[in-house]
Amino acid sequence: MPLFSRELGIDLGTSNTIIVEGNQILLDEPTVVAIVVYEQKMVEWGRAARDMIGRVSDTLEVVRPLQHGVIAEYEVTEKLLRFLVKKVVGPMQLFPPRLMMTVPYGVTSVESRAVHEAGLGAGREVYMIPQPLAAAIGIDLPISTPSGNMILSLGGGTIQSAVLAMNDVVRAESLRTGGVRMDEAIIAYVRKKYGIIIGQPTAESLKIKIGAAVPQDQQATLEVQGQDQVSGLPKPVSLTSDDIVDALQEPLQEIVSSAKRVLEKTPPELISDIIDRGVALCGGGALLRGIDKYLTKALGIPAYLVDNPTTCTAEGAAKALSMREALSRSLLPN
Ligand SMILES: Nc1ncnc2c1ncn2[C@@H]1O[C@H](COP(=O)(O)OP(=O)(O)OP(=O)(O)O)[C@@H](O)[C@H]1O
Ligand SMILES: [Mg+2]
């Protein structure tokens, strides 16, 4: 039985939860839980629970306990976190682990306290780090130097634009919108253009399989099943990449506006560093085809996809555990 306490970085996201120890990813699963309504018992979690969305009777409730990066259902989150941590560390632990949990930039003290408390149900000591800072550490940006670095984190429920220097967030903005909002834009587009209603999982798969931020040379097509808006009967609809590009223009514009607002507030010395180094794109939304090209054009600064866009925030949180002193100004108070 190990006598030392394990150290875990945990990125509890709106869409996915990732747990990292050292440089090893121990868990990467959707933040979804299926609960039996009458006894509030968790019966399924992660991928299995996500695959149940929109497909279960009233006796089961399929819940995403985080909304826009913050805890929306406290008890479910606490239970899930305790379950996941136990799952990765195993039952034979003398001491509960030390945790570094990520929280979106700019959360309220009530929201961060909820994360801290939920963490204490699973760990011995709980630290909290703003997500853009964790992501920057996870992609090895030189943030301990005075030079400026910019990162855009495009998650399921949040969009965070941040400029970092000297181990701290210098300027940033967090929007309570993200990949889920893109799915909604696709649903609205298909309804308006074709009079067909599709569900969120279908919209998300259109976005991932054929979606793009800019028109593609290779036009892809996907046929999906929907419901006729007038008759209510099932009806297939065929969509192209260009359809999805059209549908996503408004949510993409929101990302641009947010990044521009942060750049406007950034001191000029840091701006010139950012122009040299480019803007790092992370989060699942950074995987949208052509979003680097789109943002490079819209911002006038090169934007690039990082190597580990979906795991960098959790990887950075795990690294931050051994950098606590250097990061002391930037970690959130308990
Ligand atoms: N190839 C892709 N193209 C576009 N979007 C994608 C792609 N792959 C995943 N996504 C989207 O990325 C989002 C999930 O990203 P991520 O796992 O970074 O979010 P999260 O960390 O759970 O959320 P948040 O940080 O907002 O709390 C989902 O909305 C998903 O649809
Ligand atoms: Mg995230």
Image (spheres, helix red, strand yellow):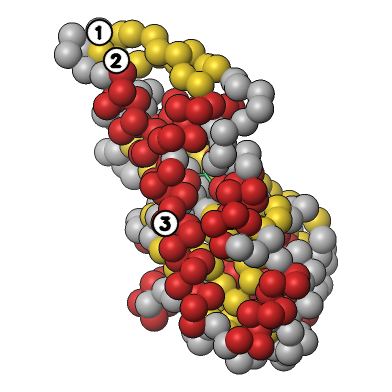
Residue 314 at x, y percent in the picture: 67, 61
Residue 155 at x, y percent in the picture: 53, 54
Crowd class of label 2 (few under 14; some 14 to 19; many from 20; radius 10 Å): some
User: Mark 2 sits on what residue?
Assistant: 227
Given the image, on which type of amino acid does mark 2 rest? Gln
The answer to whether 322 appears left or right of 108 in the picture is right
Q: Is residue 43 visible?
A: no
Q: Residue at 80% x, 74% y: name it.
A: 4
User: Would you identify the image quadrant in which residue 62 lies?
Assistant: top left
Residue 119 at x, y percent in the picture: 53, 69
Q: Earlier in the sequence, mark 1 or mark 2?
A: 2
User: Mark 3 sits on what residue?
Assistant: 254
Marks 3 and 2, how far apart at CA: 29 Å
Q: Residue at 64% x, 48% y: name it.
A: 293
**Which residue is farthest left?**
230
User: Mark 1 sits on what residue?
Assistant: 233
Given the image, on which type of amino acid does mark 3 rest? Glu
